[in-house]
Every structure is written in structure tokens, then in C-alpha cells.
Amino acid sequence: MERTHIAILGRCNAGKSTLVNRITGQDTSIVSDTRGTTTDPVQKAIEINGLGAAIIIDTPGIDDDTLLGNERVARIGKVLDKTDIAVILLTDEECNAERTLIEECRVREIPVLVALAHIDRIADYPSLQATLSKQLGREVIAISALTGEGIDLLMQRIVALRPTEERLITEGLCQAGDCVLLVMPQDKSAPKGRLIQPQVQTIRELLDRGCTPICCTPDRMPQALEALATPPRLIITDSQAFAEVYKLKPEASALTSFSILFARYKGDIHLFTEGAKALNTLTASSRILIAEACTHTPQHEDIGRVKLPRLLRKRFGETLHIDIVSGNDYPEELTPYDLVIHCGACMFNRKHVLSRIERARQQGVPITNYGIVLAALTGTLSHLSL
Ligand SMILES: Nc1nc2c(ncn2[C@@H]2O[C@H](COP(=O)(O)OP(=O)(O)OP(=O)(O)O)[C@@H](O)[C@H]2O)c(=O)[nH]1
Ligand SMILES: [Mg+2]
């Protein structure tokens, strides 16, 4: 699910953690008057009235000197990579660091809200609020996370800034009334007793769109097709089953994969297909970075850790250098690599994927994703609807 990521930023002791606790209505973060209490970003999933699913991110102080300078910048940078809305807290007229942060957000196209915090203990807060507003050339909301004053207004402003772009996973590939066949292997690498996020999200969207989703595992695909009076408009398969599904696909059905759908939905499918062209120039001494969004214990037939490296080495040679990173461990410096291959990123928001794509693009390193590479290596890419 696409959750709006809201980061609470500011200097140490600005009351970031107190505000996060107030918004989430829980003791999500540790609060104390010791500077640098929050050293790692803390995320909390919540539902916000009028906005829907969100993640509130508590962050270390932008002036936290208990962290090394570059470490601090890197941590804030990683938060900004996924931030849809930034809330910056101030407590006095000093606002140089905040100005720099506002500028960084402008470059990254992140909408910013500025709030003067701790107003319960600032004698003439309206005049400080006016001064800051003038200095920064923008609205400054007055809040107290302690008493709750001003929080309703802050939440209203947050809701007003929510990303409004409505995106569909299956945009342009099917319409109301269409039957869509989903081929979903439930092998050892699938979680026990449930479906993975991309499958659930796609089924839900198809139901909402008035389509008829039908599900099967690859081995039951012939029976599923037989049970239908006409071929499905679209077949969506797990990338791993491309080859066998393609063989069984009726002429009249379009074919795509969950990872292609999510590359379109979360990333930039055209840049990813461009990036996959790098596969034509790789050699046995090339270096590849495989980046996974979620951290999970490596599994026997894991696609990112086992299958993809095996296919790549088979194609380009055993000496091919492959680094695998997961979660937030996406390197700043991508130039050592000849190609970055990202997972479908079902656990990331779109902003996060776009930030990663942008970093690769700026450094001139081709980037693509699992589904596209699997399709390219198995020769099915040209048969897919993108
Ligand atoms: N009077 C008053 N005190 C507050 C308010 N918000 C936070 N505080 C106090 O300020 C101190 C610091 O609050 P935190 O929420 O830990 O601040 P922080 O910005 O998370 O600090 P770091 O994690 O160190 O960066 C605590 O003693 C809080 O109780 C407020 O609105 N009014
Ligand atoms: Mg804190």
C-alpha cells in the first residue's frame, strides 16, 4: 500500500519525538531533555483522517553532534529519500540550519510545513511566529506538542499537502468487465498462510475497477483457462513463471508480470527498460548491485539472492561481481557499478523508489528491476505488455 511518509525534522530538543507521540497517540518515541535522544529514524504507521494511510518518521536532530557530521547528513538524507511531506520544528529565532533543510527539500520537491514549537513556554510567541514567518517567507504554524495547541491546524495543513496523484497498478492494461488471470506460485519462498503485498494489492484494485480477477498457481493454469468461456483480457504472472506462462498464453491475452506492474506503479518503467539494455554490454568482470527493499532472512530459492545471481553468472561468467544490499542500505556512491537491479519495491513508497532512480541517473549508472531483468534474460521481454 502506498503510505504517505511524513518526516518530523528539526534541531535536538525541538520536541520532534513529543510531536510524533502526540500525532500517533502513543509512546512511539523516547522523549527526554537530553540532546540527541533520537539517534535513528523511528517510523510509525498510522491512519490520518482525510489523508489515509501514513507513516510518521521521527528523526535525529539536524544539529545532533553526538553523531559524526557525515553520518548525520546521511541519516537525514535517507529519511528525505522517502519523505512525501516534511514538517520542520523551530523553537527560537535561529533558523539557519532549517533554512538549509528547506532548500534541500525544495531541490527534492518535498512540500514543507514549518512550525514554531513549545509555544506554551514562549511568552510572546505570536511576535516570534511573525518574525520567523517573515524571515522564512512562509507560513509558520504555532504548536505545543505538550498541550496540544495548534496540532489540529498542523494536521489540516498536512492533509492539504497529501499527494493527490491517483495511480493505478493496472492502468491501461484492462478495464471494467475484463477477466484477468493472476498466476501466483506459492512456493517455498512465499510466506506461510498469506499472499504477498503485490498480489493482494493487485487483486484489490481489479475488484475496485470492476474486473474479474481469477487466481491460480502455474501448474493449474491449463485448468483455469479451460474453465473460462473466453481467454482472459490480461494475464499477470509472477516473473519466475514467465517462460511456462508464455507457452500456455492464449493468443488473445496480453501478458505482464507483477514486477513489471510495480515498476510502472512505483518507478519509471521506461528508464528501467533503458537500463536493462546494459545487459547487452556486461562482461565477466562487470559489477552489479542488487538492491532489495525488504529485509528478510535469505531463503533457499530467493529471487534476489539466489535465482538472479545464478542467471546472471550463467550468462556473463562466474567471475561477475555481485553485491546485494537490502532495506535502507542503498549506497550513496553507485559509480563502482555497471548496473543496478532493484526489486519490485512493494514495501517502499513511490517517492523512495524515485529518489533511488534519480541517484543512479545523476551518477550515470543504468538502473533496472528484477522483473525486467528476468524477462530479458529468459527472452520474454518483447512479449510483455509494459
Ligand atoms: N514546554 C514544552 N516542552 C516540550 C514540548 N515538546 C517537547 N518538550 C520537551 O522538550 C524536551 C525534548 O523533547 P523531545 O521530544 O525529546 O525532543 P526531540 O526533538 O525529539 O529531541 P532529540 O531526539 O534529542 O533530537 C523534553 O523534555 C520534552 O518534554 C512542548 O510543546 N512544550
Ligand atoms: Mg527525539
Image (cartoon, rainbow, N blue to C red):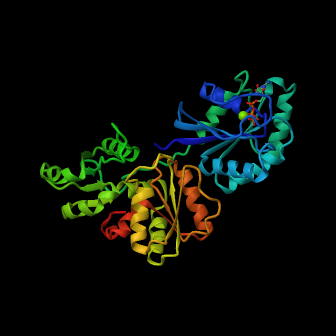
Is residue 86 among the parts visible in the rendering? yes
Quarter of the N terminus within the rendering:
top left
Quarter of the C terminus within the rendering:
bottom left
Q: Is residue 274 above or below residue 354?
A: below
Percent x, y of residue 96: 83, 48
- Give the left or right position of residue 172, taking residue 294 as reference: left
Q: Which sits in the foreground, 66 or 50? A: 66
Percent x, y of residue 258: 36, 54
Quarter-of-image position of residue 7? top right
Residue depicted at x 73% and y 51%: 71
- Give the left or right position of residue 127, taking residue 242 as reference: right
Residue depicted at x 72% and y 28%: 31
Q: Which sits in the foreground, 338 or 86? A: 338
Q: Quadrant of ligand 2?
A: top right
Q: Residue furthest top?
A: 147
Total count of labels? 0
Percent x, y of residue 385: 33, 63
- Give the left or right position of residue 132, taking residue 56 as reference: right
Q: Is residue 149 above or below residue 57?
A: above
Residue depicted at x 32% and y 44%: 203
Q: Is residue 210 above or below residue 306?
A: above
Is residue 152 among the parts visible in the rendering? no
Quarter-of-image position of residue 125? top right
Percent x, y of residue 149: 72, 24
